[in-house]
Amino acid sequence: VHKLDDECEYEAISYAWGDYPEFDQTLFLDGQILKISRNLSAALRAYCHPDRARILWADAICINQADAAEKTQQVAIMADIYSKAKSVQAWVTPASKDTIEAMAFMAQLASKANVGDSEARRLIDDAAKAHVDYLVSRSWFRRVWIVQEVSLAAELIVSCGHSTMGWTDFARA
């Protein structure tokens, strides 16, 4: 437990409960059992450092979901939570063949400067082949809260499994 005023460097996780939001995964935390979604469980596994501690903030863990008063109080300070985070990790989806191809394509596209019309048409065709449509149709992109999380983040990292890229490059692509 940390107060926002404390000197504590942490990263916030921006994620969607997922396309199947059942809380059927078990997290053991401070001797307690907490049920979380598959999507959050996958994010935590991907963000875990095997050789050092990492302080992560995730709403389903850090806010008592059964306590309406706590949820109301925490929602009121969401802007502070995301703006004071060292970085925001945007967990879009677990890795798959399609997301790995899409993230690689997005990284390649972000490195291109200005392109002409014929190049743009070719890139649109290439994007379809690289499954970018699948990537941007994930439930994370349909959350209204991402507007706040993206705009307040000191640094935003988009993640699909272990494939990552900065938000600026992702948005440019």
Image (cartoon, grey):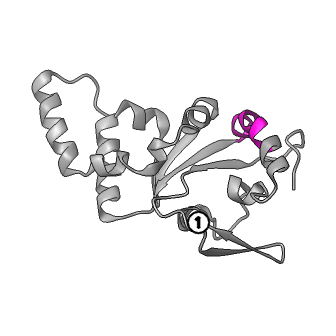
Q: In the displayed structure, does residue 1 sit left or right of residue 82?
A: right
* Residue 105 at least partly seen: yes
The answer to whether residue 102 is above or below residue 43 is: above
Q: x, y percentage for residue 123?
A: 18, 37
Residues packed near mark 1 inside 10 Å, few (<14), some (14 to 19) or many (20 plus)? many
Count of labels shown?
1
The answer to whether residue 6 is above or below residue 47 is: above
* Residue 58 at least partly seen: no
The answer to whether residue 67 is above or below residue 35 is: above
Question: Between 111 and 88, which is closer to the camera in this rendering?
Answer: 88
Residue 79, picture quadrant: top right
Residue range highlighted in magenta = 74-85
Q: In the displayed structure, does residue 157 sit left or right of residue 171?
A: right
Q: Quadrant of the N terminus?
A: bottom right
Going by the numbered disc 1, the residue's amino acid type is: Ser
Residue at 54% over, 37% down? 144
Q: x, y percentage for residue 163?
A: 43, 56
Q: x, y percentage for residue 84?
A: 75, 37
Q: Which residue is mark 1?
A: 37
Residue at 56% over, 35% down? 150
Element class at badge 1: loop
Q: Main secondary structure of the magenta part?
A: helix
Q: x, y percentage for residue 81?
A: 74, 40
